[in-house]
Image (cartoon, rainbow, N blue to C red):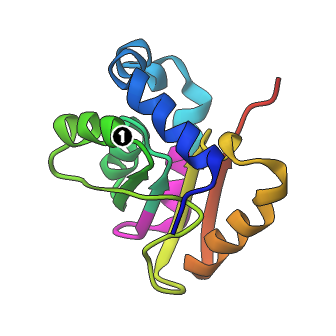
Amino acid sequence: MTSPDFVTTTRAFYDAVAEDYAELFVDELAARPLERAVLAAYAELVGPGGRVADLGCGPGRTTARLASLGLDVSGLDLSDSMLAIARRENPEIRFAQGSMLELDFPDGALAGVVSFYSTIHTPLAELPALFAELHRVLAPGGHLLLAFQVG
């Protein structure tokens, strides 16, 4: 299957800037107490050992934070270069290459889905399909944590 143009463009961009991005945002969560609190509250909602996918995980910093909070978390990203950093920095965590539009999880398999600032690359017209895919993989009563910026 051929990827939509926006997927190909997003992958190419993050492949090109991965090392610089990872260096620029190395301690991003340290300077964001509200986001750390949101992640902690989310982990508490999901519960210890809950299976969670961090979609658009980039260099895996949020994924690592979720793992440190007791979740059974894996990361997914389009960019092989971002995933190389995530694997290098977090060898104990599972990371896979893929698209949020075509998740490789069975229906209802996840206690939680996290998408921290990664849906911003999806065109408005594609968001219903994206959200349907997130809903598909969430177990009944599962939790979605979605963060995005505007402007």
Above or below residue 19? Residue 130 is below
Q: Is residue 138 visible?
A: no
Identify the residue at horizontal 58%, vertical 34% (top origin).
35
Give the number of callouts.
Answer: 1
Q: What residue would you read off at disc 1?
A: 60
Q: Which residue is drawn at 51% across and 69% down?
A: 1
Which stretch did the figure color magenta? 39-52
| Relative image position of residue 24 (x, y in whole percent) | 42, 13
Note whether 57 is above or below 21 in the view shown: below
| Crowdedness near tag 1: few (<14), some (14–19) or many (≥20) residues, C-alpha within 10 Å | many
Task: Report the front residue among 55 and 31.
Answer: 55
Name the residue nearer the viewer: 6 or 29.
Answer: 6
Residue at x 44% of width, y 64% of height? 52
Residue 83: x and y in percent read 31, 42
Q: Where is residue 114 in the image (x, y as percent from the top left)?
A: 55, 55
Location of the C terminus (image quadrant): top right
Q: Does the magenta stretch include residue 111?
A: no
Q: Nearer the viewer, residue 62 or 8?
A: 8
The secondary element bearing badge 1 is classed as loop
* Three-letter residue code for mark 1: Gly
Residue 41 in view (yes/no):
yes
| Residue 75 x/y as whole percent | 38, 53
Of residue 41 and residue 139, the one placed in the foreground of this image is 139
- Say above or below: 80 vs 25: below
- Residue for point 81% across, 29% down: 150
Is residue 41 inside the magenta stretch? yes
